[in-house]
Amino acid sequence: MAGLKAIKTKIRSIQKTEKVTKAMEAVSAAKMRKAQVRALAGRPYARAAVAILSRLSGAQALSNHPLVRAHTLDTTIDVGSTTSPTRALYIVLTSDKGLAGALNSAVLRRAERDIRDSGMSRSHVSIIAVGRKANDFFTTRGYAVEVYHPNTDTLTSELVDEIVLEAANRFSTGVVDLVKIVYQQFITTFEQRPTMHTVFPLSLPELSQVVKDIIPARGAFSAPAAEDEPRAYEVEPSEGAVLDLVLPKLASIFVYHALLETQASEHSARMVSMKSATDKAGEMEHGLTLQFNKARQAAITREVSEITGGMEAMAS
């Protein structure tokens, strides 16, 4: 009977685990949908940003702006037939929590592979980590984590502005020569793709690609955004003053939608992981139930045999 009790204890434990994973699956599904809706709600703003940059792309002041002009390097690292910036800042977005499959590891591998392929040493790389997983990963490997932000479900404009301002200041003052952002792009519920974009120097193709990524391939929201031709404007008080205000706002598109994509990907991956855990718990419960029934039947058969043997012994 001790074996039966142990099996029954395991079944109850698995049933409790199954309830927890099923609840976490439901919560993640609701949060994923909310993140998707927020990303779609911000799409008109992103489209407008692309239109603004497209119209201003013909202005001379734009091409000479510190946030747009690529740095001319005196010292570069040769990587095959190409050259690589000597200093780079990576904005890496991960989650604070686990139980999301390979969500975080894929992003971290993508960032580390790009650093390795560029030929830069750890001393030439700095990190803005959004999410505890990114902070722990790069800290333990000796990279300079300049800024760390927790990645919570509460996404504020202050967080976006702080990240963009930190990156813009480092790039415009020449502390770094390149700023990239690495995150999980939400494709479908069952598919997320590690994605990297160059934030600074700011360019129209990169910003257009970000907007393209957040537009669904099918459905009511799938209409493509029309791009405007470059135009010449007379700007007051000056082109420089306007661009100093506008360009960081355009760059915030990268960070804002990367954070939304990361949240949607996190909740989607966790939902799928919890569904797999729930299904596995159900399979284990079924197997243990069969084992329990077999053990109980064997115990009953043994007791009946003992009783029958005892009665025959008494009769003789």
Image: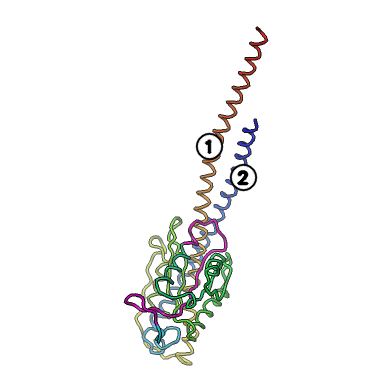
Circle 2 residue: 16
The answer to which of 114 and 243 lies nearer the viewer is: 114
Between marks 2 and 1 in the image, the one whose residue lies nearer the viewer: 1
**Few, some or many residues within 10 Å of mark 2 (<14, 14–19, 20+):** few
The answer to which of 252 and 8 lies nearer the viewer is: 8
Does residue 81 appear left or right of residue 67 in this picture? left
Quadrant of res 206: bottom left
If the image is split into quadrants, where does the C terminus sit? top right
The answer to which of 133 and 157 lies nearer the viewer is: 133
Does residue 266 appear left or right of residue 304 in this picture? left
Q: How many marks?
A: 2
The answer to which of 124 and 65 lies nearer the viewer is: 124
Circle 1 residue: 287
Could you tell me which residue is drawn at 55 percent across and 39 percent down? 285
Does residue 54 appear left or right of residue 27 in this picture? left
Kind of residue at badge 1: Gly
Q: Is residue 246 above or below residue 22?
A: below
Q: Sequence order check: which comes first, mark 2 or mark 1?
A: 2
Q: What element carries label 2?
A: helix
Q: Distance between the residues labelled 2 and 1?
A: 16 Å
**Which portion, as a residue range, is magenta?**
76-105
Across and down, in percent, residue 22 comes to 56, 49
Across and down, in percent, residue 161 comes to 54, 77
Across and down, in percent, residue 90 comes to 48, 74
If the image is split into quadrants, where does the N terminus sit? top right
Report if the CB atoms under discs 2 and 1 are less than 8 Å apart: no
Kind of residue at badge 2: Lys
Across and down, in percent, residue 124 comes to 47, 78
